[in-house]
Image (cartoon, rainbow, N blue to C red):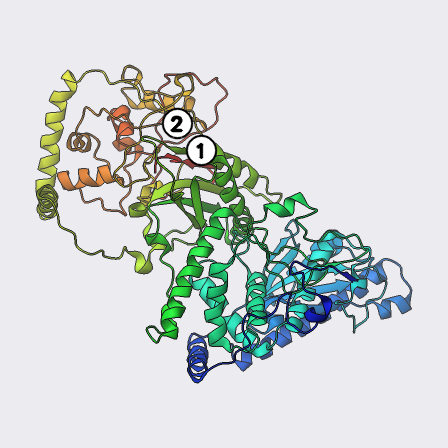
């Protein structure tokens, strides 16, 4: 192979004497204080449970030995079926290699084992691996949660064997017999193979190269174990959602080890944050010079490849063909990681000055207290097995949603996808939810009334997700905008919001709290208040002028899967600031307005409107000029609502809804003017496709979900909701 000069421009003689492409920043060794801090760090990592027991280590070795035997038998079976000679059947072989955290020696309890099966040229991936071997594994009692992902960037089969998680890849190399002592670090294994095979082989080749290029393997392992734990605690450990995965963190740590070859773990952790806080991206991180070969496999080179110039945080793999392992990073996720690097650097400076302990570095990131606005992506399937594959597919597409939002808002709306999925244990259906924080780009002037409308963006994302080739009935996705105060309780620590410091209250706020406390004393008083308000409202209705239609741009709406139990998704057009108001805007020809004169007066008319006039493409905005007070509205509807407005209704009327209350059933609101409810954001609207042409000024259909939540069978189309808002 021919070695290119590299970005450092160092002469070959000098490069041979150093680790990496540049000279080290410092060759100083640890002081006594550094040694003491390293011991404290290692003790903290042990106490945190990051090291597995000897029993689990032995169990992993047994699982690997069993997988090795399975693939050997599988290849021999295929060789016999394809009519090869008995000698060929006897010589037929497959070899198992490990990579990732297990190969690097930094895996912890419960971590998966990244494995690669290398087989002969006549055993292919599409049919032999993903069908025949899949069926063999499916019939084994020790194998559970078997999930093939053939369309991934690196095709993989995921499963658990004896409780140990395994990610199994396959590479078919151009030989008839795979030798047991095969050296995959040699470039000959890359001859006449496809790109997916190259990517599969590179996992092992990169891991081996990393261990060869670091000055001290043990210091590297301790530092990497620490930084991986930190990244998980701070919510930036996930390659699939646009952050960094295991190999990315390994490469970053390895580069710091090269820059400080004599440093111990405590020094390396501190220097890690110091280096990457000051790193000028998109300058690449490289452990060695980029190699070129006559095989013709593309390597990362922004001078030749225009696409490589678009990478935000290039971290280059050291094995040929050198690639950018962090191509998933976007502008938004890079911003989040840089903020976390700065936070880590500040804490490490305090640790070096004995002003803080190591535990302060690993404080969990309070994601749900950081932003005022979030996107909630609910994933539903018919059963647990379907959810496993459906969730994996949707999670792999979340990065695309971030990129689409950046594209369609010109980078003005920044996203923070959180890599953890959440499950509401109170629900029996198979489901989970992902969340993304939203905020306006800092330093940008805000025009009054300016909105972010991402309805079309989310609709595009929804259509791309629905292209899943293994889609089954019951697999649904729901996307909605929620505010911080409306977050569902199952995402919060211990199931409730943390108390905030007390603030000085105005007299009006104090009066409201007082009234709410009084209302909570006697339910009879509450009923009397509602009755009086209802009588007052009846008098007002006769003299109330006809209400003007609310207008907004045409849009695709989203219905929450469980709006009745979540306070998070009530307003269809949501304001992103706590006290801001959404202004009706848009094209008159593309609106669906609710006219008082066309509002049905009885159940049959309402049901007919629901049947004929429910749409996938709606935009509803609250009318700014509300002629009915919230007290009067509450007395009319009797509906428990979850917006800030409706919470005020509950306080004023003594309703005992609370954040976990459910919306009333359809029968309870049929006597209510739907226009009033819609104007106040108190009900959810369901939309389905209709064959008739969409016309302006058509009364919209009201669809209140049952208390049990949405049934996947009755909701056969994924929908989006509440995605036009102002920051």
Q: Is residue 416 left or right of residue 183?
A: left
Decide if residue 162 is in sight here.
Answer: no
Left or right: 577 as drawn, with respect to 256: left
Q: Residues within 10 Å of mark 2 (few under 14, many from 20)?
A: many
Q: Residue at x 66, y 54 (%)?
A: 155
The vertical placement of 629 against 224, above or below, is above
Q: Are marks 2 and 1 in contact (CB under 8 Å)?
A: yes
Q: Is residue 363 above or below residue 352?
A: above
Give residue 553's quadrant in the image. Answer: top left
Where residue 270 appears, as percent x and y from the top left, is 45, 70
Residue that badge 2 annotates: 619
In the image, residue 40 sits, relative to residue 535, either above or below, namely below
Q: Residue at x 27, y 39 (%)?
A: 643
Q: Quadrant of residue 18?
A: bottom right
**Nearest to the observer: residue 47 or residue 131:** 47
Q: Element under label 2?
A: loop
Q: Which mark is residue 291?
A: none
> Measured along the vertical axis of the image, is residue 543 above or below residue 525?
above
**Where is residue 559 shown, x and y percent of the image?**
40, 36
Q: How many marks?
A: 2
Query: Closer to the camera, 683 or 484?
Result: 484
Kindly identify which residue carries mark 1: 455
Q: Is residue 574 visible?
A: yes
From the top left corner, tell me how far across and down residue 448 is, in percent.
31, 31
Q: Is residue 296 left or right of residue 463?
A: right
Q: Residues within 10 Å of mark 1 (few under 14, many from 20)?
A: many
Considering only order in the chain, which callout, 1 or 2, is on the residue closer to the N terminus? 1
Say which quadrant the C terminus sits in.
top left
Q: Is residue 639 left or right of residue 559?
A: left
For the residues labelled 2 and 1, the Cα–Cα distance comes to 9 Å
> In the orientation shown, which residue stands out farthest toward the bottom?
32
Whole-percent x and y of residue 163? 55, 69
């Amino acid at each position: 192979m021919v070695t290119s000069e590299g970005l450092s421009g160092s002469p070959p003689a000098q490069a041979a004497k150093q680790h990496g492409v540049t000279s080290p920043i410092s060759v100083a060794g640890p002081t006594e204080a550094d040694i003491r801090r390293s011991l404290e760090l290692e003790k903290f990592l042990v106490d945190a449970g990051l090291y597995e027991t000897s029993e689990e280590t032995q169990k992993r070795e047994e699982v690997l030995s069993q997988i090795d035997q399975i693939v050997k038998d599988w290849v021999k079976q295929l060789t016999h079926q394809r009519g090869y000679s008995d000698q060929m059947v006897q010589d037929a072989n497959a070899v198992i290699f490990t990579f990732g955290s297990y190969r690097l020696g930094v895996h912890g309890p419960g971590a998966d084992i990244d494995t690669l099966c290398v087989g002969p040229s006549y055993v292919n991936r599409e049919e032999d691996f993903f069908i025949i071997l899949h069926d063999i594994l499916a019939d084994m009692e020790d194998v559970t949660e078997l999930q093939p992902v053939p369309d991934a960037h690196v095709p993989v089969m995921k499963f658990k064997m004896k409780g140990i998680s395994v990610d199994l890849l396959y590479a078919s190399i151009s030989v008839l017999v795979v030798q047991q002592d095969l050296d995959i670090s040699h470039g000959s294994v890359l001859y006449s193979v496809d790109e997916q095979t190259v990517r599969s082989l590179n996992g092992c080749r990169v891991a081996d190269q990393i261990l060869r290029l670091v000055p001290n393997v043990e210091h590297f392992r301790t530092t990497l174990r620490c930084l991986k734990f930190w990244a998980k605690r701070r919510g930036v450990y996930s390659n699939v959602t646009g952050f960094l995965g295991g190999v990315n963190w390994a490469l970053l740590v390895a580069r710091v080890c090269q820059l400080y070859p004599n440093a111990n773990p405590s020094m390396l952790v501190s220097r890690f944050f110091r280096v990457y806080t000051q790193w000028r991206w998109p300058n690449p991180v490289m452990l060695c010079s980029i190699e070129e070969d006559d095989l013709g496999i593309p390597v990362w080179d922004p001078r030749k490849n225009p696409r490589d110039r678009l990478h935000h945080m290039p971290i280059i793999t050291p094995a040929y063909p050198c690639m950018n392992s962090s191509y998933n990073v976007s502008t938004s996720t890079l911003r989040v990681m840089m903020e976390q690097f700065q936070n880590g650097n500040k804490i490490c400076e305090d640790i070096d000055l004995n002003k803080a302990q190591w535990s302060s570095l690993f404080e969990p990131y309070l994601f749900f207290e950081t932003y005022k606005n979030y996107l909630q992506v609910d994933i539903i399937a018919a059963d647990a097995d379907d959810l496993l594959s459906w969730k994996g597919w949707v999670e792999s597409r979340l990065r695309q949603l971030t990129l689409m939002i950046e594209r369609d808002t010109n980078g003005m709306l920044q996203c923070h996808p959180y890599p953890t999925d959440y499950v509401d244990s109170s629900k029996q259906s198979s489901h989970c939810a992902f969340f993304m924080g939203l905020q306006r780009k800092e330093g940008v002037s805000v025009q009054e009334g300016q909105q972010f409308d991402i309805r079309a963006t989310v609709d595009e994302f929804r259509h791309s997700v629905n292209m899943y080739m293994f889609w089954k009935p019951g697999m649904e996705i729901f996307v909605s905008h929620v505010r911080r105060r409306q977050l569902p309780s199952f995402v919060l620590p211990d199931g409730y919001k943390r108390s905030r410091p007390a603030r000085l209250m105005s007299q009006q706020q104090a009066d409201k709290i007082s009234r709410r406390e009084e209302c909570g004393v006697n339910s009879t008083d509450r009923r009397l208040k509602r009755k009086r308000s209802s009588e007052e409202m009846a008098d007002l209705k006769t003299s109330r002028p006809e209400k003007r239609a609310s207008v907004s741009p045409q849009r695709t709406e989203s219905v929450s899967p469980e709006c009745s139990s979540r306070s998070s998704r009530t307003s269809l057009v949501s304001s992103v600031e706590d006290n801001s108001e959404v202004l009706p805007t848009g094209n008159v020809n593309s609106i669906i307005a609710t006219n008082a004169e066309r509002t049905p007066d009885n159940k049959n008319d309402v049901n007919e409107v629901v049947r004929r006039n429910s749409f996938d493409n709606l935009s509803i905005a609250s009318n700014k000029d509300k002629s009915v007070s919230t007290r009067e509205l509450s007395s009319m509807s009797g509906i428990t609502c979850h917006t800030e407005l409706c919470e005020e209704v509950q306080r004023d009327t003594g309703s005992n809804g609370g954040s976990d209350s459910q919306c009333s059933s359809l029968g309870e609101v049929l006597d209510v003017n739907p226009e009033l409810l819609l104007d106040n954001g108190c009900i959810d609207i369901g939309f389905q496709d209709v064959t008739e042409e969409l016309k302006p000024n058509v009364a919209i259909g009201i669809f209140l979900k049952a208390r049990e939540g949405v049934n996947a069978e009755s909701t056969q189309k994924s929908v989006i909701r509440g995605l036009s808002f102002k920051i």
